[in-house]
Amino acid sequence: MNESEARTVLLIQALESGAEAEGRLLTPAQSREASEVVRAGLPKPGRTLKSQDWSERFLVQRAQRLLQDAAARRPALRGFIEGGGGFWPLVQALVVVAGFAAGFASDALVNPERINLLSAPLLGVVLWNWGLALLWLLSRLFLRRRRVAPRAPGWLAGLAAWPGRWRRGGFAVASRFSRAWARAAAPLWQARVRAALHLGAVAVALGLVAYIGARALPNEFSVGWESQLIKTPEGVHRLLQILFWPVTLLPGVAGVAPFTLEEVTAMHHWGQTSPALADRWLQLVTALLLVSIVLPRLLLWLIQSRRARRYTRHFPLDLTDPYFARLLAEGTGQRLRLVVWPYGLTLDAARAAALQRQAPAVLGVEAEVSAQPALAYGDAVEAVARRPAPAEGEVLECAALLSLSATPEAETHGAFLRRVAQLAPQALVLLDSGAFAARLGRGERLKERETLWNEFVRPYGFTRVQVVELGG
């Protein structure tokens, strides 16, 4: 499934999820007919097609068929499909032009008449890139266990549907589609934005190099320094040693050596300087920008661009979403079983029956509820039962069940959620509000507790949270 096909599938989801006029562009009869026709035309999964491939083909062909029916009544719907990432090369080109111009002009504005060893643009660009690299390294070292699902910024949700948003009658569909697209396309947008930012950083560095070259070609100049903050040559010398440290690590670069303390002292207020020192400064700065910024950022740009191309060709659409689970279960004739891991509550017969009744609302399709042994509060999470194997003709949906009345704690609830995420990475979280509502009602405090739990489970990789009421 590529990006365009994913947009088609999500547009049909937006149309079928609507209860207003736009939703009636597709009747239930049309939806059932499309499912039956597409299912009849595809080989059964597991024979000539893998299950994932069959699922994607079924959803894409069904969505394309329904789009023809809906677009015949409202042609403006095709504007949503046309609003893909075709404009992204232009965005990257604009980022490159802006970055190059900023790099070229920054040193010219700050140092219009002479070259300063302590050039603010040069120091700012290099230290900014080093700071980002340090933050990335620290996040890898200390936050590697806290997996957060990618989320697109809010403005991308509006951008996603802009080709059709302002056409007549498309507001409700655009709102649903843009939210779904921003959520589904977050990995793709993240890769594209990162690639553009890496390319912009390369352009800024090359702009600085171009300005230095343009300044050196028609003129012979000297370099020096002055500073209100660093008044001694020793301080400037230490700063330059840190700044040009990456260049000193390069093997076999003849003639590129950091300035000595005596040379830095001689260049104070452009006192005793020479073209030879200026030549060395040109070599040092060029090598520094290439080693510290241009080459690493180009490598990162290639990585992110390749990732974006992979997502464009193989879009990461989450088929465990209840809407898709219902369609695929109906399309394949398979049964759906909800496997539940309770924590801090007992799933007795009454609660199990209540969850069975609410399963269609949670999953979008009838499902058999299967409860794993409950884990008491504070018990070792290693005791959580393993995920059972699906029976023949059965699709498993997994969920962690917790009580909304409990205050979430990282040491207990967090450890339990990490264990569930290991057993079932695509699991959802069910929050039982029965005891809380019976004690405190269903007012503002219930909403606050729901928000608290939603924010708590997100860093553990759970993006689907449903509130159920199983009784007090």
Image (cartoon, rainbow, N blue to C red):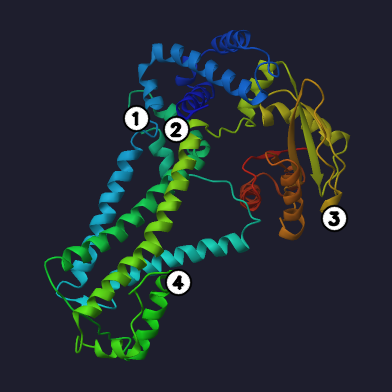
| Crowd tier of the residue under label 1, counting other residues whose Cα lies within 10 Å: few below 14, some 14–19, many 20 or above | some
Q: CA distance from mark 4 to mark 3?
A: 50 Å
- Residue at disc 2, secondary structure: helix
- Residue at disc 1, secondary structure: helix
Asked if the residues shown at circle 4 and circle 3 are in contact, with their CB atoms under 8 angstroms apart, the answer is: no
**Residue type, mark 4 in image:** Leu
Q: In the image, is residue 130 above or below residue 185?
A: below
Q: Residue at x 41, y 35 (%)?
A: 160
Q: Decide which of tag 2 and tag 4 comes sooner along the chain.
A: 2
Residue pointed to by mark 1 = 163
- Residue at disc 3, secondary structure: loop
Q: CA distance from mark 2 to mark 1?
A: 13 Å
Residue pointed to by mark 2 = 175
User: In front: 472, or 131?
Assistant: 131
Q: CA distance from mark 2 to mark 4?
A: 54 Å
Asked if the residues shown at circle 2 and circle 4 are in contact, with their CB atoms under 8 angstroms apart, the answer is: no
Q: In the image, is residue 369 above or below residue 228?
A: above
Residue pointed to by mark 3 = 380
Camera-near label (4 vs 3) is 4
Q: Decide which of tag 2 and tag 1 comes sooner along the chain.
A: 1
Q: Decide which of tag 4 and tag 3 comes sooner along the chain.
A: 4
**Rendered image: mark on residue 249:** 4
**Residue type, mark 3 in image:** Ala
Residue 182 in the image: state x and y as whole percent.
48, 38
Q: CA distance from mark 1 to mark 4?
A: 51 Å
Q: Decide which of tag 1 and tag 4 comes sooner along the chain.
A: 1
Q: In the image, is residue 262 above or below residue 298?
A: below
- Residue at disc 4, secondary structure: loop
